[in-house]
Image (tube, rainbow, N blue to C red):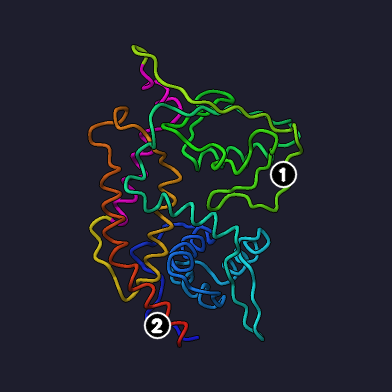
């Protein structure tokens, strides 16, 4: 498998640390879900992540972990090992892409607020961690002990993968979270309540927003994304590398910054600038990245 010359890690992004799983999920969502690429040789994945500073051993270990979690399916042909998507990864990545390419990924859907409260036995800390991770990916913030809040009308059943009613399974991770092979809680172990709420006139939710979400830290995450990507000329010669890093960073930003009502944000809130930066660069890189992958596979 030949690799285009000069594909050393981009020095402009030295010091940017991205987990191998984070990059693989971004690559899979962009080239395998959206681009329709079939099973890909491990060597191609290793080469792309190598250009982003990830060593071969780290990439192979990440691929093994994702296969163990049923997010990838190894396909062997002689001495060549390729990886295909599974129904679980297609579902998780498809839902992630719904927000990646949402017209306004930082605006709430619907009005009011969605509230969730849950409890699990102390012996099931693994379940508590997984539910918290799924709530955070769905845009919830911790309002106070045991009570989570999200703007708008969040589909709690979808966000928690069926963790409701008499079917208390926790098998719906967001990108990068725990996988479906983790043991689900037995019936009755997870107690969960979910309900809608609206502000009472005269009692603003602004304080709750400041309590549940660290707005200045979110502003900083937007600014970091813009410092890295806004105003960059697309490097089509390295489109595959760059679109993988771009989508990984965008998913990371979406995980860190939920959908928040504009009325509770400063007039100079940077979300619109981040969306503009992502869309402009992604539009220039997506096509060349697919063409580059086709050339590598043909080579």
Whether residue 217 can be seen here = no
Disc number lying in front (1 or 2): 1
Vertical arrangement, residue 293 with respect to residue 58, above or below: below
| Viewport quadrant of the C terminus | bottom left
Residue 240 screen position, x and y as percent: 39, 71
> Could you tell me which residue is drawn at 29 percent across and 63 percent down?
283
Q: Which mark is residue 4?
A: 2
Q: Which residue is mark 1?
A: 184
- Check residue 117 for magenta coloring: no
- In the displayed structure, 36 sits above or below 22; it is below
* Picture coordinates of residue 192, whole percent (x, y): 63, 29
Q: Is residue 22 above or below residue 165?
A: below
Which picture quadrant has residue 269? top left
Is 217 on the left-hand or right-hand side of 273? right
Q: Is residue 159 visible?
A: yes
Residue most extreme to the top: 202
Residue 223 in magenta stretch: yes
Residue at x-position 43% and y-position 51%: 98
Q: Residue at x 35, y 39 (%)?
A: 107
Region in magenta: 204-229
Out of 18 and 102, give the one closest to the viewer: 102
Name of the residue lying farthest toward the front: 166
Mark drawn on residue 14: none
Q: Report helix, strand or loop for mark 2.
A: loop
Q: Marks 2 and 1: in contact by CB < 8 Å?
A: no
- Residue 29 position, x and y percent, is 47, 62
Q: Residues within 10 Å of mark 1 (few under 14, many from 20)?
A: some
Task: Give left or right: position of 148 versus 163.
Answer: left
Residue 128: where, in percent of width, then height?
A: 65, 36
Q: Under tag 1, what secondary structure?
A: loop
Q: Nearer the viewer, residue 103 or 243?
A: 103
């Amino acid at each position: 498998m030949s690799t285009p010359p000069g594909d050393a890690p981009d020095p402009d992004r030295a010091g940017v640390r991205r987990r191998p799983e984070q990059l693989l999920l971004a690559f899979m969502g962009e080239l395998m879900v959206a681009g329709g690429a079939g099973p890909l040789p491990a060597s191609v994945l290793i080469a792309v992540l190598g250009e982003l500073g990830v060593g071969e051993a780290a990439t192979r270990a990440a691929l093994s972990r994702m296969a163990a979690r049923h997010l990838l399916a190894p396909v062997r042909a002689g001495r060549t090992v390729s990886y295909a998507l599974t129904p679980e990864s297609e579902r998780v990545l498809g839902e992630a892409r719904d927000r990646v390419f949402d017209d306004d990924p930082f605006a709430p859907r619907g009005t009011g607020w969605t509230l969730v409260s849950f409890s699990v036995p102390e012996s099931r800390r693994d379940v508590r961690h997984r539910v918290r991770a799924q709530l955070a990916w769905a845009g919830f913030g911790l309002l106070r002990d045991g009570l989570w809040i999200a703007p708008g009308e969040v589909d709690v059943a979808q966000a928690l993968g069926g963790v409701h009613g008499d079917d208390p399974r926790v098998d719906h991770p967001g990108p990068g979270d725990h996988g479906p092979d983790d043991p689900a809680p037995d019936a009755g172990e997870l107690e969960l309540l979910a309900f809608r709420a609206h502000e009472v006139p005269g009692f603003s939710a602004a304080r709750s927003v400041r309590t549940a979400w660290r707005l200045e830290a979110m502003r900083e995450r937007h600014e970091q994304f813009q410092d890295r990507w806004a105003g960059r000329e697309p490097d089509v010669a390295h489109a595959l590398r760059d679109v993988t890093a771009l989508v990984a960073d965008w998913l990371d930003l979406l995980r860190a910054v939920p959908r928040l009502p504009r009325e509770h944000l400063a007039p100079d809130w940077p979300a619109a600038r981040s969306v503009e930066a992502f869309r402009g660069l992604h539009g220039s890189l997506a096509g060349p990245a697919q063409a580059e992958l086709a050339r590598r596979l043909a080579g």
